[in-house]
Image (cartoon, rainbow, N blue to C red):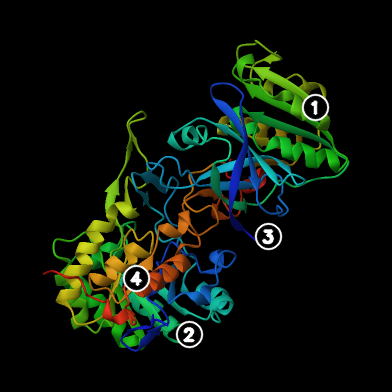
Amino acid sequence: MKKLIQDFELVKHEELNCEHFILDIKAYEALPEILPGQFVNVRVDNNSSVFLRRPLSIHNVDYERNVIQLFVKRIGEGTKSLGELKIGDKLSVVYPLGNSYSIPKNSKTLLIGGGCGVAPLLYLAKHLHEAGNEVTIILGVRSSYDAVGLEVYKPYGRILVTTEDGSQGEKGYPTHHSVLKNESFDYSFTCGPEPMMKAVAAYSESKGIPCEVSLENTMACGFGACLCCVTDTKKGNKCVCTEGPVFNIKDLKW
Amino acid sequence: MVNLEVKLKDLVLKNPVMTASGTFGFGEEFADFIDLSDLGGIIVKGTTRHHREGNPYPRMAETPSGMLNAVGLQNKGVENFCQDIYPRIKDYQTNVMVNVSGSMVQDYVETAAMINDLEHIPGIELNISCPNVKEGGMAFGTSCASAEEVVREVRKVYKKHLMVKLSPNVTDITAIAKAVEGQGADSVSLINTLLGMAIDAETRRPLLSTVTGGLSGPCVKPVALRMVWQVAQAVNIPVVGLGGIMNAKDAIEFILAGATAIQIGTANFIDPQVSVKVVEGIKNYMIRHQVSDINDLIGAINLK
């Protein structure tokens, strides 16, 4: 897939809560095909102390309006500054980057996201749904305060929630959800904190089902030139930006 | 029309803009973004005699106006380069040079000898300045005796353009430059990264797996510019300047300081099109300053 560098314009900024926000960025020309699990690398021009681009998962894509949606958590200087962008501001975007989740057909699929790791799961759920899969999404958050924006998943499948404090859905981590005991699945997909993804990987291995995880890593370029964002796999160091971010757990040393 | 062509001894560059090793992959990574034939040259990823896995993660930390890296020369070795990569990149219409690194003199010699046989590779950049390899690399570039030895031995087997990449992590970079010139280097490129480190105060842990790493980006530019200026006065071979060049203005500064050509490194990560923008920007500068030949700008700093 050809990678592009283009200016986008911020057309919508939705605050979900004080930590999370969604940016709708619009391209001036038709978007290329974007696969679920791919990411963008955006330049943060409104803060001179942010030197490198910031890699962000693609939350959703609207081809009709040429809009990419980014789900962002305020973590450091870069993401905080992105949250200060105003409607009409320009963003330089390098995309579409990385590989993608695989899309099976007519299967029972399980998607587990934790925290801002939910970012790529919406677009994945859309693709899985379109390919005739049954989609179950479990979102794990700390409390009901973080369980925001869930209705957007509903057209594509069943959405379940776990909260650490029990304020919404089932109490505990997403891998403790009762649906994992009561039902079986053919494929699992996950994105979120590494301990959670490792728990999803362990669950999937115990059930003998394929599991794909999306890894996060500090990146400089995002397209395989700097070799900074490696992860140690069974086949040696692999760049998360080009050979990931999605990995099948059978290739990881987990 | 302005003349952008420069010569590094016998090596003709259509313009003075090259890309720095370790920031440009094998060029292929940038083919979606730019036409590689618009560049004076590209220096591809550091290549060693044998496969290297590089350093463990984390390998990168952002700094004010720059970044630290500790990649550690991850590469598949020179045999893989000759067999798999060279056929893919040999027809690029630009000077494709290979950065050669090693941990022993013999490694450098064997690697250089194998690359000498590749018809479409007009030169190598001998990396005696990588700060991220424990068993060597920078060690060769920090003493005159070891720098001389590795250049002398490689010179015996390598017949094309031999550029030597110098480390800034030395007391007197001009002494090293003169030492490698004396052993037959055709040009010197400088600077490689500055040795630095970063700590996460919250976790009290280093941000790089190797604790220390190489600092690059605009934060190093004043140091690089100073060293290029000093070396350009000390040697008679061409100097290739690099270190924090982000735009054409930066590139012109290096040329005025005495660089015959420049390399763009870290900036490639932020703007994969920056190298061709610098070529355009140099042209515009020359038109604006009514300079018809880029060679008239080399070392043209006005000290009066």
Foreground mark, 1 or 2, reads 1
Are callouts 3 and 2 both on one chain?
A: no
Calculate the distance from the C-alpha at mark 1 to the C-alpha at mark 4.
55 Å
The kind of secondary structure element at disc 4 is: strand
Q: Is residue B213 left or right of residue B144?
A: right
Foreground mark, 3 or 2, reads 3
Please state the horizontal and vertical placement of residue A40, each as a whole percent of the image: 59, 47
Q: Quadrant of residue A199?
A: top right
User: Around disc 1, counting alpha carbons within 10 Å, would you say few (fewer than 14), some (14 to 19), or many (20 or more)?
Assistant: some
Q: Is residue B152 or residue B103 the one in the foreground?
A: B152
In primary-sequence order, the first of circles 4 and 2 is 2
Mark 1 in CB contact with mark 3 (< 8 angstroms): no
Q: Which chain is disc 4 placed on?
A: B
- Residue hosting label 3: A1
- Residue hosting label 4: B262
Foreground mark, 4 or 3, reads 4
